[in-house]
Amino acid sequence: MAVNLLSHEVSDLCIGKPALRVLPISATIHEAILVLKQCGDTYISVWTSEAFAGKFCMVDILCYLCAEENISSPEAALKNSVSVLLSNETAALMGHVESHSRVIDALNLLLEGPRILWAPIQSTASHPKNPGSITGHSTMFCWLTQEDFARFFFNSIATFSPVADLSVSHLGLVRSTDVFTVHRHDPDLSFLPLISRALHEQTSVAVITHDRKLIGEISPSPLASCDESAAAALAALSAGDLMTYIDWRGSPPEAISEEDC
């Protein structure tokens, strides 16, 4: 039965997935911010003349605006192309799979290095208002992540018995190493590289006290829902205050109080 499950087509994983919101690589950072605000999507994909070049979210923009070379001249930074948000590392995290490919083949591709696969979901007549269509193409695409594969397998968890009876620690799902941590009083931009790494690793940055007690986390996910004004908070607040700022979605209390560690 497990063999039959792995023989399903990738199109089964694409059911219900939203079409990608796409921008050309020539679009500016300012244009990207406007699209993020208007469409409500978390991520925007970038397309070249041949293929996807990568994707980015508001977290990438905030980290870019807070970079040393941009923080003193944000207006100039906003005029740059979205290509500055992409890197060779970003491209290496993506892979392409056809909708008729087998699930096992797509899974093997993920194990080779890519974190995200892009796959066609349907063909329609090209339309300029279609958020998933690409100029000159009639095919719409979606992203497939590790979570999509996990969800697909969990829906048939009985097939993999006795997995359902094993503990989380026995399955090795909890890692005790490579945990990103910052002290609650660490200043502003010192933890910026960790936020960027957490975004790529699809994890969070733990906020701890001086005696290493966990008090919260800085997650790129809610940070991606903020607008560009969060760059000022990212540049000025300590790790603990930034955590509070994110929890309040950019509208924290008038005074952010801190307890002594």
Image (cartoon, rainbow, N blue to C red):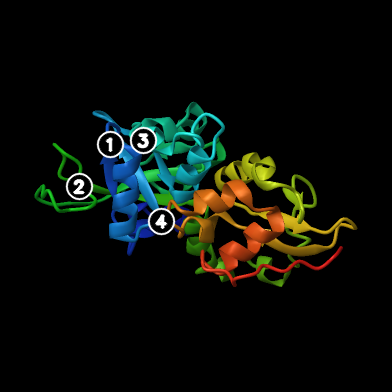
Category of crowding for the residue at label 4, using alpha-carbon neighbours closer than 10 angstroms: few (below 14), some (14–19), many (at least 20):
some
Q: Which mark is residue 82?
A: 3
The image shows a total of numbered marks equal to 4
Disc with the residue nearer the chain's start (4 vs 1): 1
Mark in front: 4 vs 1: 1
Q: What residue appears at the point 34 percent right and 44 percent down from the top-left corner?
A: 45
Q: Residue at the location (45% across, 34% down)?
A: 73
Q: Which is nearer the eye, 160 or 71?
A: 71
Query: In the rendered image, which quarter is residue 257 located in?
Result: bottom right
Q: Residue placed farthest to the right in the image? A: 211
Of the image marks 2 and 4, the number of the one nearer the N terminus: 4
Element on which disc 2 rests? loop
Q: Nearer the viewer, residue 25 or 6?
A: 25
Q: Which mark is residue 133?
A: 2
Residue closest to the eye, 256 or 114: 256
Q: Which of pointers 3 and 4 lies earlier in the amino acid sequence?
A: 4
| Secondary structure found at label 1 | loop
Task: Determine crowd level at label 2: few under 14, some 14-19, many 20+ residues with C-alpha closer than 10 A.
Answer: many
Taking 245 as reference, is 230 left or right? Answer: left
Label whose residue precedes the other's in the sequence (1 or 3):
1
Task: Tell which tag, 3 or 4, sits nearer the viewer.
Answer: 3
Mark 2 or mark 3, earlier in chain? 3
Residue kind at label 3, given as amino acid type: Val
